[in-house]
Amino acid sequence: MLVLRRELQRMGVLRARLLFELGDAVYRGDDQATETARGQIRELDELAAQREVEMQGTLVQAQLQQRRLEVQPTEMVELPDQPAQPGQGDPSGPAVIPEPYPPPDEGNPPEPAIIPEPGPLAPDEGPQEGRLRV
Protein backbone atom coordinates (compact mmCIF):
# COMPACT_ATOMS: atom_id res chain seq x y z
CA MET A 1 0.00 0.00 0.00
CA LEU A 2 2.83 2.38 0.88
CA VAL A 3 4.58 1.56 -2.39
CA LEU A 4 1.45 2.49 -4.34
CA ARG A 5 1.09 5.78 -2.45
CA ARG A 6 4.70 6.73 -3.19
CA GLU A 7 4.26 5.84 -6.84
CA LEU A 8 1.12 8.02 -7.01
CA GLN A 9 3.06 10.90 -5.42
CA ARG A 10 5.84 10.52 -8.02
CA MET A 11 3.20 10.49 -10.74
CA GLY A 12 1.75 13.72 -9.36
CA VAL A 13 5.17 15.39 -9.54
CA LEU A 14 5.66 14.14 -13.11
CA ARG A 15 2.17 15.33 -14.07
CA ALA A 16 2.91 18.82 -12.77
CA ARG A 17 6.07 18.94 -14.89
CA LEU A 18 4.18 17.71 -17.97
CA LEU A 19 1.48 20.35 -17.42
CA PHE A 20 4.20 22.99 -17.29
CA GLU A 21 5.63 21.70 -20.58
CA LEU A 22 2.13 21.66 -22.12
CA GLY A 23 1.56 25.26 -21.11
CA ASP A 24 4.93 26.24 -22.53
CA ALA A 25 4.17 24.45 -25.83
CA VAL A 26 0.74 26.12 -26.09
CA TYR A 27 2.26 29.53 -25.34
CA ARG A 28 4.91 29.07 -28.05
CA GLY A 29 2.28 27.79 -30.49
CA ASP A 30 4.10 24.47 -31.00
CA ASP A 31 1.27 22.14 -32.06
CA GLN A 32 3.44 18.99 -32.17
CA ALA A 33 4.84 19.54 -28.64
CA THR A 34 1.32 20.35 -27.41
CA GLU A 35 -0.07 17.05 -28.72
CA THR A 36 2.92 15.11 -27.35
CA ALA A 37 2.48 16.63 -23.88
CA ARG A 38 -1.28 16.00 -23.93
CA GLY A 39 -0.70 12.36 -24.88
CA GLN A 40 1.84 11.90 -22.08
CA ILE A 41 -0.52 13.48 -19.54
CA ARG A 42 -3.39 11.26 -20.75
CA GLU A 43 -1.23 8.10 -20.37
CA LEU A 44 -0.06 9.18 -16.94
CA ASP A 45 -3.64 9.87 -15.81
CA GLU A 46 -4.72 6.40 -16.98
CA LEU A 47 -1.82 4.76 -15.15
CA ALA A 48 -2.59 6.75 -11.99
CA ALA A 49 -6.22 5.65 -12.17
CA GLN A 50 -5.11 2.00 -12.42
CA ARG A 51 -2.85 2.43 -9.38
CA GLU A 52 -5.70 4.04 -7.47
CA VAL A 53 -7.93 1.03 -8.23
CA GLU A 54 -5.12 -1.33 -7.07
CA MET A 55 -4.76 0.64 -3.85
CA GLN A 56 -8.51 0.50 -3.19
CA GLY A 57 -8.48 -3.28 -3.82
CA THR A 58 -5.60 -3.73 -1.38
CA LEU A 59 -7.45 -1.68 1.22
CA VAL A 60 -10.62 -3.77 0.83
CA GLN A 61 -8.61 -7.01 1.18
CA ALA A 62 -6.95 -5.71 4.34
CA GLN A 63 -10.31 -4.75 5.85
CA LEU A 64 -11.77 -8.19 5.04
CA GLN A 65 -8.79 -9.91 6.64
CA GLN A 66 -9.19 -7.74 9.75
CA ARG A 67 -12.88 -8.62 10.02
CA ARG A 68 -12.13 -12.33 9.64
CA LEU A 69 -9.65 -12.13 12.49
CA GLU A 70 -12.16 -10.32 14.69
CA VAL A 71 -14.81 -13.06 14.39
CA GLN A 72 -12.54 -16.07 14.81
CA PRO A 73 -13.21 -17.99 18.02
CA THR A 74 -10.58 -17.85 20.73
CA GLU A 75 -8.63 -21.07 20.98
CA MET A 76 -7.22 -22.37 24.24
CA VAL A 77 -3.71 -23.71 24.00
CA GLU A 78 -2.24 -26.04 26.57
CA LEU A 79 1.47 -25.87 27.09
CA PRO A 80 3.28 -29.19 27.48
CA ASP A 81 4.82 -29.93 30.87
CA GLN A 82 8.44 -28.94 30.78
CA PRO A 83 11.02 -30.05 33.33
CA ALA A 84 12.16 -27.22 35.59
CA GLN A 85 15.42 -25.60 34.59
CA PRO A 86 18.19 -25.48 37.17
CA GLY A 87 17.76 -22.43 39.36
CA GLN A 88 14.05 -22.16 38.68
CA GLY A 89 11.63 -23.03 41.42
CA ASP A 90 7.94 -23.63 41.44
CA PRO A 91 6.37 -20.44 40.03
CA SER A 92 3.46 -20.76 42.43
CA GLY A 93 5.82 -20.89 45.45
CA PRO A 94 7.36 -17.96 47.32
CA ALA A 95 9.72 -15.62 45.47
CA VAL A 96 13.41 -16.22 46.04
CA ILE A 97 15.18 -13.07 47.19
CA PRO A 98 18.98 -13.11 46.82
CA GLU A 99 21.12 -12.34 49.85
CA PRO A 100 22.59 -8.82 49.96
CA TYR A 101 26.30 -8.39 49.34
CA PRO A 102 28.24 -8.30 51.54
CA PRO A 103 26.42 -10.27 54.17
CA PRO A 104 25.57 -8.11 57.19
CA ASP A 105 27.90 -10.02 59.49
CA GLU A 106 31.04 -9.35 57.43
CA GLY A 107 31.33 -5.65 58.23
CA ASN A 108 31.63 -2.74 55.85
CA PRO A 109 32.34 -3.31 52.17
CA PRO A 110 35.63 -1.94 50.83
CA GLU A 111 35.55 1.65 49.63
CA PRO A 112 37.56 3.18 46.81
CA ALA A 113 40.72 5.07 47.73
CA ILE A 114 40.25 8.75 48.43
CA ILE A 115 42.48 10.81 46.17
CA PRO A 116 42.86 14.48 47.08
CA GLU A 117 41.88 16.86 44.35
CA PRO A 118 44.53 19.28 43.09
CA GLY A 119 44.09 22.81 44.27
CA PRO A 120 46.03 25.96 45.13
CA LEU A 121 48.94 25.59 47.49
CA ALA A 122 48.70 26.95 51.01
CA PRO A 123 50.96 29.96 51.70
CA ASP A 124 53.35 27.90 53.80
CA GLU A 125 53.52 25.08 51.20
CA GLY A 126 54.54 27.26 48.23
CA PRO A 127 57.89 27.08 46.47
CA GLN A 128 60.73 28.39 48.58
CA GLU A 129 62.93 29.63 45.77
CA GLY A 130 63.76 33.28 45.75
CA ARG A 131 63.28 33.73 49.49
CA LEU A 132 66.15 34.64 51.67
CA ARG A 133 66.49 32.99 54.99
CA VAL A 134 67.97 35.01 57.74
Image (cartoon, rainbow, N blue to C red):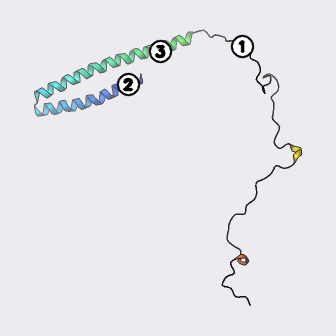
Q: What amino acid is at disc 3?
A: Gln
Q: Residue at x 70, y 63 (%)?
A: 117
In the displayed structure, does residue 117 sit left or right of residue 36?
A: right
The x and y percentages for residue 79 are 70, 14
Labels 2 and 3: the sequence-earlier one: 2
Q: For the residue marked with disc 1, what is the amino acid? A: Pro
Q: Residue 100 falls in which quadrant of the image?
A: top right
- Residue under label 1, please give it: 80
Q: What residue did someone put label 2 on?
A: 5
- Going by the numbered disc 2, the residue's amino acid type is Arg
Decide which of 27, 125 is in the foreground and name it. 125
Spatial CA span between label 2 and label 1: 46 Å
Which element is circle 3 on? helix
Q: Residue at x 43, y 17 (%)?
A: 59
Mark nearest the camera among 1 and 3 is 1
Eyeballing the image, is 48 above or below 133? Answer: above
> Residue at left 72%, top 63%?
116
